[in-house]
């Protein structure tokens, strides 16, 4: 199985991306439209203040059937009260009318600044423009991928083709407000495979848990996170093969989001091993990957053992013995291991610096407590993150 970071045509779907004036010039309004109703599943943010599109989207996907997705960027339509919910419902109605499909068959998404009213006049006009600018070629899917971006530096997409010929295409956005429990990210996945909505729910939940729920940029859980999976039903598909491929596709998209993190210069792959259970493994992983001191040390290629010890030690419910702790840097035969006995070995510590200067940094932390492990991905923290977010709304 090969994941390709390219767009591909998938039978039964059209795409589009246009500018409707939410942004000055770049694309800001996009859609995915299926030729017929699709089996569907979705996973949303766990934030206690979900955006209006999330509230409406949960309602619309509840029966496991969707035919269209509509997304605006620049404005998240979050914390906008009843008016925001009405705006999301109207967006679905306006696009549904243009496409001649019921509003409930449309799932809305919004991403951008929180707390500002959505310009519904532009959205209403935009639905007409978008409906007349849909196509199945990769040029149109590229327009969609660009239309959903906010602080992203580039669009994110990937596809995989199963042995049966079934295609899965994923398009995502996200660069900040990202914590290992979904992120300020939107991800739309389509397949020409033939799967029921219940199978899609199970498959999507597993894939999200192994990918989008395992990434960190800045520890903040967004109000707008949405991952949607649509199945057009054209090709008979083995559920097990589909699950394996979907997992891999979502992991690749998740890594793309981390690599494009606001101010990020490096991708960090962190494995926690030797934990006494899965829960504790994830707690340790999140404590390390979310630590600003760990992130800044990696940004500066500073081989500071103490920062990792600190991050491990603040998982208060699972104390470990320092003498059991081993931190491996690098991969395979080039790995360097630090532990309490060798933490002051200057030559050994300096051998870590080149590894921390790489664009991809690999770390495994052995706890010596059991047999369970977890994998997460994150990025470093640079001056660029502060510059990007200090003046985000201005």
Image (cartoon, helix red, strand yellow):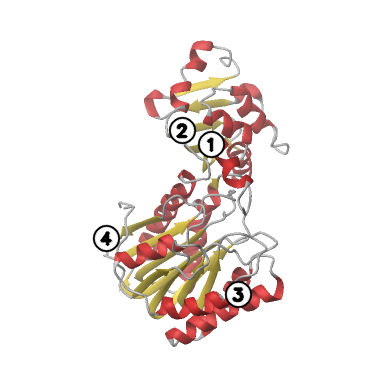
Q: CB atoms at circles 1 and 2 under 8 Å apart?
A: yes
Which comes sooner in the sequence, label 4 or label 1? 4
The image shows residue 73 at horizontal and vertical percentages of: 52, 63
Which comes sooner in the sequence, label 3 or label 4? 3
Q: Which residue is mark 3?
A: 56
Which comes sooner in the sequence, label 1 or label 2? 2
Q: Secondary structure at mark 1?
A: loop
The image's mark for residue 361 is 2
| Above or below, comparing residue 200 to residue 287 in the picture | below
Local crowd at mark 3 within 10 Å, few (<14), some, or many (≥20)?
many
The image's mark for residue 163 is 4
| Residue 158 appears in the figure | yes
The image shows residue 217 at horizontal and vertical percentages of: 56, 44
How far apart, in angstroms, are the residues tagged by discs 2 and 4? 32 Å
The image shows residue 90 at horizontal and vertical percentages of: 58, 81
In the image: residue 197, left or right of residue 370: left
Which comes sooner in the sequence, label 3 or label 2? 3
Disc number lying in front (3 or 4): 3
How far apart, in angstroms, are the residues tagged by discs 4 and 1? 37 Å
Local crowd at mark 1 within 10 Å, few (<14), some, or many (≥20)?
many
The image's mark for residue 380 is 1
In the image: residue 179, left or right of residue 80: left
Q: CB atoms at circles 1 and 3 under 8 Å apart?
A: no
How far apart, in angstroms, are the residues tagged by discs 3 and 4? 36 Å
Q: Secondary structure at mark 4?
A: loop
Which comes sooner in the sequence, label 2 or label 4? 4
Residue displayed at 47% across by 27% down: 356
Q: Residue furthest right?
A: 316
């Amino acid at each position: 199985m090969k994941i390709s970071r390219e767009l591909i045509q998938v039978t039964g779907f059209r795409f589009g991306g246009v500018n409707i004036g939410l942004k000055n010039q770049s694309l800001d309004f996009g859609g995915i439209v299926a030729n017929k109703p699709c089996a569907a599943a979705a996973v949303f943010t766990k934030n206690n203040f979900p955006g209006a599109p999330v509230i409406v989207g949960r309602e619309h996907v509840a029966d496991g059937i969707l035919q269209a997705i509509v997304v605006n960027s620049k404005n998240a339509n979050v914390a906008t009260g009843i008016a925001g919910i009405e705006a999301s419902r109207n967006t679905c109605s306006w696009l549904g009318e243009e496409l001649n499909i019921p509003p409930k068959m449309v799932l809305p998404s919004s991403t951008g600044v929180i707390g500002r009213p959505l310009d519904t006049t532009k959205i209403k006009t935009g639905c007409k423009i978008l409906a007349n600018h849909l196509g199945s070629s990769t040029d149109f899917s590229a327009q969609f991928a660009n239309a959903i971006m906010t602080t992203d530096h580039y669009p994110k997409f990937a596809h995989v083709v199963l042995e049966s010929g079934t295609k899965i295409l994923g398009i995502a956005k996200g660069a900040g407000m990202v914590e290992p429990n979904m992120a300020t990210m939107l991800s739309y996945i389509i397949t020409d495979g033939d799967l029921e909505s219940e199978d899609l729910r199970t498959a999507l939940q597993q894939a999200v848990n192994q990918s989008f729920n395992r990434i960190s940029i800045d520890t903040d859980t967004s109000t707008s996170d949405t991952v949607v999976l649509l199945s057009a039903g054209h090709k008979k598909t083995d559920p097990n093969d589909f699950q394996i491929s979907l997992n891999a596709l979502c992991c690749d998209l998740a890594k793309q989001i981390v690599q494009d993190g606001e101010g990020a210069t490096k991708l960090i792959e962190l494995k926690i091993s030797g934990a006494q259970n899965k829960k504790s493994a994830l707690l340790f992983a999140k404590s390390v990957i979310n630590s600003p001191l760990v992130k800044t040390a990696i940004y500066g290629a500073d081989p500071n053992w103490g920062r990792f010890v600190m991050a491990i030690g603040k998982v208060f419910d699972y104390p470990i013995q320092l003498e059991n702790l081993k931190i491996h840097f690098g991969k395979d035969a080039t790995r360097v291991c630090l532990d309490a006995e060798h933490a002051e070995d200057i030559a050994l510590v300096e051998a870590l610096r080149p590894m921390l200067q790489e664009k991809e940094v690999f770390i495994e932390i052995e706890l010596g407590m059991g047999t369970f492990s977890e994998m997460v991905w994150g990025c470093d923290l640079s001056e660029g993150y502060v510059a990007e977010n200090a003046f985000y709304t201005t």
